[in-house]
Image (cartoon, helix red, strand yellow):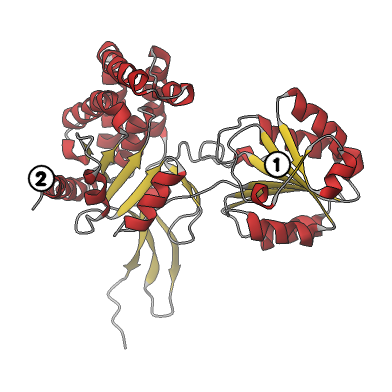
Amino acid sequence: MTEAKATMELMGQRARQAANKMRLADTQSKNKALELAAVILRRETSEILAANALDMEAGQARGLDAALLDRLLLTTERIEAMAEGLEQIALLPDPVGAMDDLRFRPSGIQVGHMRVPLGVIGIIYESRPNVTADASGLCLKSGNATILRGGSEAIHSNRAIAACIRRALVDAGLPQDAVQLIDSTDRTMVGELLRSKEYVDVIIPRGGRSLIERVSSEARVPVIKHLDGICHVYIDVDADEAKAIAIAVNAKTQRFGVCNAMETLLVHRDKAESVLPEIARQMREKGVELRGCARTRQVLSDIRVATEEDWGTEYLAPILSIRIVDDVYMAMEHIARYGSAHTDAIVTENYSTGRLFLREVDSSSVMWNASTRFADGFEYGLGAEIGISTDRLHVRGPVGLEGLTTRKWVVLGHGEVRQ
């Protein structure tokens, strides 16, 4: 047995034992751990910043670009945001043990569902040290144990943050192994985690396409993930033009490098000349490069030609592709062919068309007269999210506390026996 495999097996055993205890933990104890973790993070701010300085120095020496260094950087304000995030999770309703769909059967029994934790959750992520606190908090509140594997560039920061969380678990009377950080930059540890089907119940990757592709191809346990965020806004013939312009501009420019930003704008042919010039003007003011189909370039003659590759690209940058379509059916065909089943929106005042779009577009979030930027756990009222799933099994869309649980059948009887 290799050292990496032996280490992972020991961590898996400890996580399974901790998960069995966390499954039975009461809400008060879990909330206490979250609140204590927030206190300890604030108290240990100087130590966390010192650890982060080591990561920043190493990252600069490795030549990490400015965007990666910004994601890696911790400040007093960012640590305070982590602490506040844990306190917000403590305020959320506890999904564990909740029963719903209870109904009586002719036999007299009552049948329903109860929410229960998934068990042991492996989380693999890059760059952002705040994920260590966020993921730990969500797994803790939902009664799970977690094994965390952060990026090697953030190893010192992640160690410092995880130590704070583990200390809070002990002080709250909960098993400290409910949160474990893989304390190694050895890449073989990722492979061992992905193959730990005896101990790990689900894997959640958070990072770039290469990470998620690796996790998807190598994992021997279920994976909750989304690969791309190729999101569309379709402006229908019956759209309110003011709404359409505001939604399109917001969906693209509110933030560029996020998975729920619009990457392709679809416009009904009868709306193109009335909305595209103003949309283009506002996009250019915000530094967005526009690319369009031949019909679009008849309206906006100075933009680049959109290629076949553009329609299937998640830019995560100030670039937007625009296509003029004949009707809602052509728009939906485009989305079905090039979309990534993440988030797609229609702008229309036509009730029948709006309902058709909601029903027919097969994405994890489908919107009517709203910006795609709302596809977010906080905006959906989940309080927080651990990621977004475009899969169809178990959970779809933003994954909050309820998404980190599953359901079991419960039967309430009064002495009934089956005849």
| Amino acid type indicated by mark 1 | Ala
Which mark, residue 350? none
To which residue does mark 1 refer?
370
- Tell me the distance, in whole angstroms, between the alpha carbons under discs 2 and 1: 51 Å
Q: Position of residue 342 (x, y in %)?
A: 57, 50
Say what secondary structure mark 2 lies in: helix
Which label lies toward us, 2 or 1? Answer: 2
Q: Residue at x 58, y 42 (%)?
A: 375
| Amino acid type indicated by mark 2 | Glu
Q: Position of residue 142 (x, y in %)?
A: 33, 44
Between 399 and 321, the one lying in front of the other is 321
Relative side of 199 to 115, left or right: left
Relative side of 246 to 102, left or right: right
Vertical side of 375 occupied by 56: above or below: above
| Between discs 2 and 1, the one toward the N terminus | 2
Outermost residue toward the top in this view: 46
Tell me if residue 175 can be seen.
no
To which residue does mark 2 refer?
3
Say what secondary structure mark 1 lies in: loop
Vertical side of 304 occupied by 120: above or below: below
Q: Quadrant of residue 114?
A: bottom left
Q: Quadrant of residue 282?
A: top right
Between 118 and 90, the one lying in front of the other is 118
Q: Quadrant of residue 42?
A: top left
Circle 2 packing at 10 Å, graded few (<14), some (14-19), many (20+), is few
